[in-house]
Amino acid sequence: MSVDTLERVVETTVDAGVIDCDIHPAPKGPLGVMPYLPPRWQEHLKRFGNNFRQPFTGGMPYPRFGDGNRVDARLPDGGYGGSDLAFMQKQHLDANNVAYGILQPLAPNAQSQRNLEFSAALATAVNEWQLEAWCRPDQRLKASLVVPQEDPEASAQEIRRRASDRSFVQVAVAPRAIEPLGRKRYWPIFAAAVESGLPIGLHVGGFGGSPPSGSGWVSYYLEDHHSNAESMQALITSLVLEGVFEEFPELKIVLIEGGFVWLPALSWRLDKHWKTLKAEVPHLKRAPSEYIREHFWFTTQPIDEPQKPQHIRETIDWIGWDRILFSTDYPHWDYDDPATALNKIRMSEAERRMIFRGNAAALYGLD
Amino acid sequence: MIDLGGIDCDIHPTVNSTADLVPYLTGYWREMVPMRTMGMLDLASYPPSNPLSARDDWRSANGRGGVELAKVQREALDAFGTRLAICNVLYGGPVLYSDDMAAAICTATNDWLADQWLSRDSRLRGSIVIPTESLELAVEEIERRAGDPRFVQVMVLCMGEMPLGRKHYWPIYEAAERHGLPIGIHAGSSYRHPPSSIGYGSFMLEDYVAQSQTFGAQVASFVTEGVFEKYPGLKVVLIESGFTWLPSFLWRLDKTWRGLRAEVPWLKRRPFEIVRDHIRMTLQPIDAPDSGNQLERVIDQLGSDDMLLFSTDYPHHQFDGDAAMPDLIPASLRRKILVDNPLQTYPRLQEAFA
């Protein structure tokens, strides 16, 4: 018998249903959120479209395979995966016993628009669309409050305006911003989030203009996709070293789709070199790893698959089983199936319940 | 003093100022150095006064570390019973914007290293510094040094204009492979780009921690571009990169490759296997807790005894006292890290041990 796997078939679903912390709703067609924009910005969108810090008017800087979704998520009428509630209910929410699903609207991308007024109008539209097209028709779905992040004051206004609507369970900020998010210019967003009792959810992505590596633009989508994990490490470094958690001791941060297996090594590296260079950051009262342990949560997809699955177990033992949140990334191509994705990781029933439901329920205030 | 009897794969003899290099410059550049205030080309990644750039007890009277041969001999070589040490000079030549100026300073730096250090202590070996972004001049510099067996690798900085696996740089790897020279990628940035994909942060500490993330990107670049398929004899050494991040980095790279391997059809094996065959890492800094079993776990996760090469990173401040080889390193690995792995990695060192 291998110590890495259980002999019996593993029941991965939790009786009361799982909480999926990363579901991507898509608008019906490229102009799907149009009705939620005021006329001035409808006209702008038609005429000028998106304006990001990347070379193409449509699509992504690194072309995906297919449309980036599971092939079987495409609608029977050819519509884009994730763009129809009934189909999503049938294929994912009902089939996988999803008690709650946290929406992560990535397109249209409001956060990274270079025109800040358009960014604000689009964020408002995306938020309205989440409520009307998804959360109101299906109470299992919870929204992420999208903000025009490069205008932190406008972001704070959008947060405060919607904070009383409990359909919103977190503030959605893109990790790749113009500057590292720990810097003071973004603090109004954190102040409003804390005041509203909302965590910050950082789903990988964003067009901040900086290349995916410290040595410039990579060649392949494969590399760009992996660089998401490195972005998250730089993000934690920035938030901790700038003293964000000294200023906002109640702030909670959720890192979505960026992995977590790198966290021990990052924490060790931060702690080690902080000891030598701490005079540079005298505002820190504790070792970096202590802030990390207190303020960060991580979603599971895409779950890492080392040759020896116990390496994941050892990693979570170090991070804390209370910090890991299950996610599928439905309907994207690298979707993790709740019935199979984590099966190789040896877990107690209590640990399973925490990851698939309990941790997210506690964090997001869902029963 | 302890007698490890090892091969130290990363020490830093240090250029005091460009004045040190003037005797090795040709006429035009001798004039330009004072005329254009080129006196101080220290890398922004390693400001001399920064606590990480030199341990206090390893600094000379002028406040800098690594500037006196006798002190380096005593503190870096004798103190650890070091049999051979590879000198990696971190100075501004490779990051200058002008091709010709970069080449001139790199050539002078290599001449200075040979004349002032390698010729004065038979334990010392050197890395060839090159004007990395100027292909023809970079290859010329490799050809110029390749006949001198004391130069044992070609060194580039971790953060440059482009990811190092890209075809643009392949003439460097062709020359390096042909001459039996590994490519050493040393921590440090030319600051052509922010240190991470999220932009320019505020702190030196932030930049230093981010180095390991770009080392990861360089590993991914060398692997995905197929450099090792093209140059199967090539070895790449990550120097002062830290190494505890590598296993978890490769778990994700393996998984992403499995999903997206149609994009890189020339790869026939998992990235982790390619990395085990071609990439090596120096020991210091050891980014792991000083106690407990975490370090042992990481070494287990590497799944190879061949990848780590002993280094002190002298005079950088990575450990106190003589704890270059902490007790947490499994006893069974010590000889490999100290001697066997460096000899396997650097063919030019083998003669000294014959």
Image: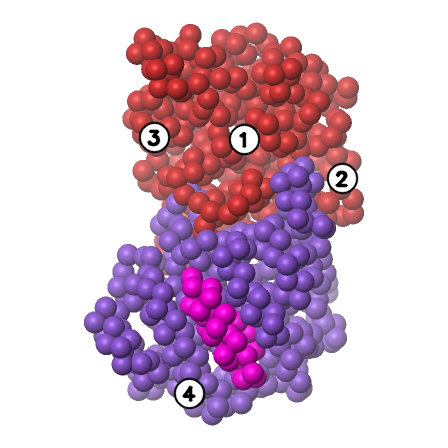
Q: Residue B46 carries which label?
A: 1
- Give the CA distance from mark 4 to mark 3: 53 Å
Residue that mark 2 sits on: B328
Foreground of the two, B194 or B342:
B194
Residue that mark 3 sits on: B97
Which chain is red in the picture?
B
- Give the CA distance from mark 2 to mark 4: 57 Å
Foreground of the two, B311 or A256:
A256
- Give the CA distance from mark 1 to mark 2: 28 Å
Which circle's residue, 3 or 1, is located before the other in the chain? 1
Callout 3: residue from which chain? B
Residue that mark 4 sits on: A133
Which one is closest to the eye, mark 1 or mark 2?
A: 1
- Give the CA distance from mark 2 to mark 3: 43 Å
Identify residue type, mark 4: Ala
Task: Please determine if labels 1 and 2 lie on a single subunit.
Answer: yes
Span colored in magenta: A145-172
Task: Please determine if labels 4 and 3 lie on a single subunit.
Answer: no
Quadrant placement of the N terminus of chain A: bottom right
Q: What percent of the width, then of the height, locates residue A129? A: 40, 83
Which chain is purple in the picture?
A
- Marks counted in the figure total 4
Disc 3 to disc 1: CB gap under 8 Å? no
